[in-house]
Amino acid sequence: MAEAIVKGLLHKRLTTPGQIGMFNRSNAERLEQLRNQYGVYTALEQSDKEKMLQSADIIFLAIKPKDAAESLRTLAPLLNGRQMIVSLIAGLPIRTIERLLGQTVPVIRTMPNTSATVGLGATGLSFSDAVSAHQRDLAEELFRAVGMTAVVEEPQLDAVTAVSGSGPAYIYYMMETMMAAGQKLGLSPQAARELTLQTVLGAAHMVIETGEEPAELRRKVTSPNGTTQAAIETLESHRFSEAFMHAMERCMNRARELGAEIERSAGE
Ligand SMILES: NC(=O)C1=CN([C@@H]2O[C@H](COP(=O)(O)OP(=O)(O)OC[C@H]3O[C@@H](n4cnc5c(N)ncnc54)[C@H](OP(=O)(O)O)[C@@H]3O)[C@@H](O)[C@H]2O)C=CC1
Ligand SMILES: O=C(O)[C@@H]1CCC=N1
């Protein structure tokens, strides 16, 4: 996810590689690849990581929820009151970030998605009380450079995760199935892939460019007693819509569980 944002920011020329520093826990090969590909600074040694954090204006937290508590505890003594923290971590509440840091700092909690890589990301944002108007504008500008943004109340970020954070995976899952089914029905792998891709792209563009609701556009594809009706009825007989609704609820609840797990470990 960090790479998606860096790639998007550089592509839009919102910053320069020399203003970006990246590090991870231990994967030197991955850092070398990022340095070669984007020209960003990277740090391997602990002392270099600390210097990078101390001199940063904006610190992006792009670590997995399971690593959040330890990382935030390590980060706490390196803060100088001037940095702004931007968290991408699913489910992790601002209050837990502040608790783990042991201080009140400007925290921007976000839920982006990987489509930021190609400038078509969708990011939900919420702000802690310590975030100034200027910092809000800056954060929105950063994420607008890689797609669209929506400012929401913090609890709604878990719903944003269910819709757009994890959303690309649902579409890829559907595409995988459409391609496999196309092949099973006799198309070549290439034809099944190309037709699926163009169908997904075209459908999204139709909603954007006609301004019509998906339900209306679907109605226009569905001839009475025709092929589409037969397909949709089959999906409904398998409770597709209900299953999808359950999946998204489960996604949102999982984000909350992840946050609660970190909160528990913050108290230990
Ligand atoms: N992937 C997605 O589509 C989205 C992800 N997110 C959120 O983004 C976050 C990152 O996810 P994702 O990019 O998929 O995960 P990745 O596993 O790809 O990246 C996590 C990175 O964190 C590094 N890391 C772990 N512990 C530390 C540490 N103590 N200090 C420094 N670096 C550390 C890892 O380094 P190393 O490899 O060396 O261990 C790795 O580079 C998650 O919290 C996720 O919820 C949000 C929206 C979408
Ligand atoms: O699967 C995950 O936990 C992360 C958060 C949103 C997308 N990927």
Image (spheres, rainbow, N blue to C red):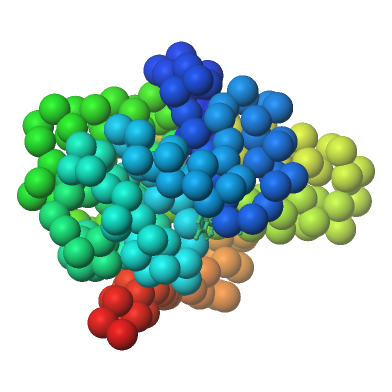
Drawn side of residue 146 relative to residue 108, left or right: right
Q: Quadrant of residue 260?
A: bottom left
Q: Position of residue 61 (x, y in %)?
A: 40, 50
At x 74%, y 45%, the residue is 29
Percent from the top left, x then y, of residue 126?
21, 48
Which residue lies at the image location 64% right of the left edge and 55% below the top edge?
26
Q: How many marks?
A: 0
Q: Position of 217 compared to 43: left or right?
A: left
Pinpoint residue 218: horizontal percent, then vertical percent. Answer: 47, 45
Q: Residue furthest front?
A: 47
- Between residues 165 and 170, which one lies in front from this camera angle? 165
Q: Is residue 112 above or below residue 6?
A: below
Task: Tell me if residue 208 can be seen.
Answer: no
- Relative depth, front residue between 174 and 230: 174
Left or right, 17 with reference to 136: right
Q: Quadrant of the C terminus?
A: bottom left
Q: Give residue 237's position: percent from left, percent from top.
A: 55, 75
Closer to the camera in the image, 126 or 78: 78
Which of the 4 image quadrants contains residue 30?
A: top right
Residue drawn at 42 percent across, 68 percent down: 70
Q: Is residue 258 above or below residue 121?
A: below
Vertical comparison of 35 with 182: above or below: above
Q: Residue furthest top?
A: 13
Residue at 47% of width from left, 67% of height from top?
67
Q: Is residue 9 visible?
A: yes
